[in-house]
Image: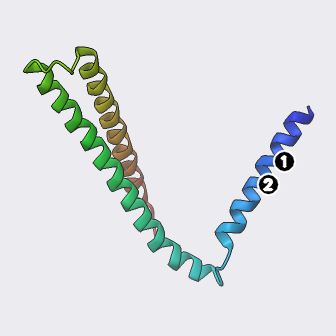
Amino acid sequence: MTANVSGIGSVLQQMQSMAAQASGGVGSPAAALAGSGAATAGTFASAMKASLDKISGDQQHALGEAKAFEVGAPNVSLNDVMVDMQKANIGFQFGLQVRNKLVSAYNEIAQMSV
């Protein structure tokens, strides 16, 4: 029972420290909204681009290994090709699901009454 209480206490402490970091240095709520939108948009866009670049890189690597296996490269085995193809497929499926969630959220926001 005390383990649960101490665990909750540590989570509460982490939440309070994150809230303090998030609100530190911001004068007014309007300034916080104005400043955080641009920063969040830039961070989100760069994170999204990095994720898409990684997905594309994984696909290109898997295709390269598949082609190397087809021509009989001695250092490429079938199981390496299959694992890399599955990694690329899982990454693509993940990216597709993220896109679907973003489109769904956009549609939901677009249908909200103002």
- In this view, the residue farthest toward the top is 78
Label 2 and label 1: CA atoms lie apart by: 6 Å
In the figure, residue 88 lies in which quadrant? top left
Label 1, secondary structure: give it.
helix
Identify the disc placed on residue 13.
2
Residue in the picture at 64% in, 68% down: 22
Hey, which quadrant is residue 82 in on the image? top left
Residue at label 1?
A: 9
User: Closest to the observer: 103 or 19?
Assistant: 19
Mark 2 secondary-structure assignment? helix
| Relative to 79, residue 28 above or below | below
Question: Is residue 77 rendered to the left or right of residue 31?
Answer: left
Nearest the viewer among 69 and 74 is 74
Furthest-front residue in this view: 74
Q: Give percent across and percent down for residue 58.
A: 27, 37
Tell me the residue at 16%/32% (across/down).
64
